[in-house]
Image: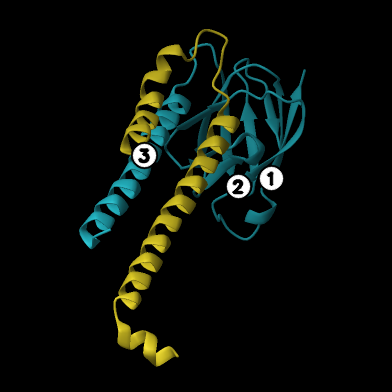
Amino acid sequence: MLGPLIMASLIPIIAPAFAQEAGDFVNRRIEIWALFYKFMVAAFVVGAAVQGTMVYISYKFREGKVKAREVTR
Amino acid sequence: MSHTMIEWVYIGAVVSILVWIGADSWIVEKNIDEIPEDAETIKVIAQQWFWTFEHEDGTKEVGELHLKAGKAYRFEVTSKDVIHAFNVPFYTAMIDAVPGRINKVWFVPDETGEFLIQCREYCGLLHYQMRAKLIVEA
């Protein structure tokens, strides 16, 4: 699972080798907005991972306690 | 799945995402910090509560800035009184205008039209009206 993510972090580091030549400018507007959207994706994915883990742990904990199920019946 | 396993997967996923986004933002910041050598310099002078722009040939504009599309411009921003901030929202350019200091920002206007230049640092009573017009011509 970590492989693709590590690759995804390495690609932008080697990407500048193909970047800006004379008269070919970085489009600041596009770069910054693209980064903003990536931040949004990262924030939502981290949020989902945290929330998902909490729900999973709570569910497993509850299922492991027979008494807790009896109380809700 | 054991708790330890869940925790390692959780930590791995979150740390990987943060490393990826950190590396990417470092690269983007590095790219946009590099001012092209052939960029034309515009001196931007802020004061309560208007903007003055000085081109390389010495011509000055007040409250309006005329630029050519597709050309790189380096803005050397300073202030005559208090701290202001030079902001062109459409071109995502913003830098503080500090008295006694020259801060630099650059961009290439790629679309023609009229765009807002606005002070983004509270600078007194008429801060909200400290605007100028960026006119990008073909």
Q: Which residue is mark 1?
A: B131
Q: Residue at x 42, y 19 (%)?
A: A15
Distance between mark 3 and mark 1 Cα atoms: 34 Å
Question: Is residue B113 shown above or below B57?
Answer: below
Task: Tell me what residue is drawn at x 41 percent, y 26 percent.
Answer: A12
Image mark for residue B63: none
From the rendered image, report the letter of the chain displayed in yellow.
A
Which quadrant of the view contains residue A33? top right
Quadrant containing the N terminus of chain A in the rendered view: top left
Looking at the rendered structure, the kind of residue marked 3 is Gly
Q: Which three-letter amino acid code belongs to the residue tagged 1? A: Arg
Which class describes the residues within 10 Å of circle 2: few (<14), some (14-19), or many (20+)? many
Residue B22's label in the rendered image is 3
Left or right of B43 on screen, residue B99: left
Q: Which mark is residue B119?
A: 2
Q: Chain of mark 3?
A: B
Marks 3 and 1: CB-CB under 8 Å? no
Going by the image, does A6 lie left or right of B29? left
Q: Nearer the viewer, residue B131 or B27?
A: B27
Which residue occupies the foreground of this view, A64 or B124? A64
Q: Which chain is cyan?
A: B
Q: Are marks 2 and 1 in contact (CB under 8 Å)?
A: yes
Element class at badge 1: strand
